[in-house]
Amino acid sequence: YEIFIDATLKDIVRKMVATLDKKVTQELLVEIENQGKNFYDILIMASIIEAEVPHEGDRGIVSDIFWSRLESGVALQSDATLNYAISGDNPALTLEQLEIDSPYNTYKYKGLPPTPIGNPGISAIRAAIYPENTDYFYFLSTPEGETIFSSTLEEHNVAKAKYLR
């Protein structure tokens, strides 16, 4: 965003909302409605996808994983939402942090957090609306920023041992 140095918080929010309104087309809104979802939930999901996955090509897959977890009644288990709650950016959360009592702790509480955790771009919004259809249920990000996908918990644990230790 280009903003003037003397811009107020209200000016900045207006610009962000105007930009969002330009990018979110009627076609996208109709698709959200056709899926039986609401725009606010899409924004929440998109904000998590934006924070979790830096590579645009991986976002649709992560979207599918998160929507599948929600549909299965499984916790999202997003590091990004918990980092939001603790104002952190730790890629390896501690066992103590995983027990923090916050509605943004998606390890502890099922469902979406109460609000977006950031300002998602259109790529993350589109991924939230159009998840790729996969059989993955797990993912992790390597220290180098690569996203590794797994279908089973066993595969995921092998990936964790290989890439995160």
Image: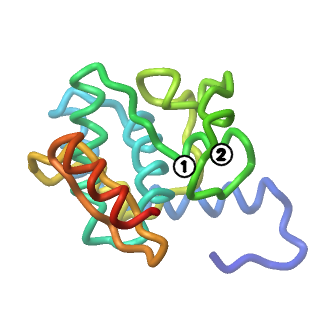
- Residue drawn 40% across and 63% down? 141
**Image-quadrant location for residue 45:** top left
Q: Residue at x 48, y 50 (%)?
A: 47
Q: Assess whether mark 2 and mark 1 are in contact (beta carbons under 8 angstroms).
A: yes
The three-letter amino acid code for the residue at tag 1 is Ala
* Above or below, 59 relative to 101: below
Dot 1: within a 10 Å radius of its alpha carbon, few (fewer than 14), some, or many (20 or more) residues?
A: many
* Disc 1 target residue: 80
Point out the image quarter for the N terminus: bottom right
Q: Amino acid at mark 2?
A: Tyr
**For numbered disc 1, what is the local secondary structure?**
helix
Q: Position of residue 95 (x, y in %)?
A: 61, 36
Q: Is residue 96 left or right of residue 79?
A: right
SS state under label 2: helix
Residue beneath the point at 29% across and 58% down: 159
Where is residue 97 drawn, in percent x and y?
67, 36
Q: Quadrant of residue 42?
A: top left
Give the left or right position of residue 117, taking residue 33 as reference: right
Q: What residue would you read off at disc 2?
A: 84
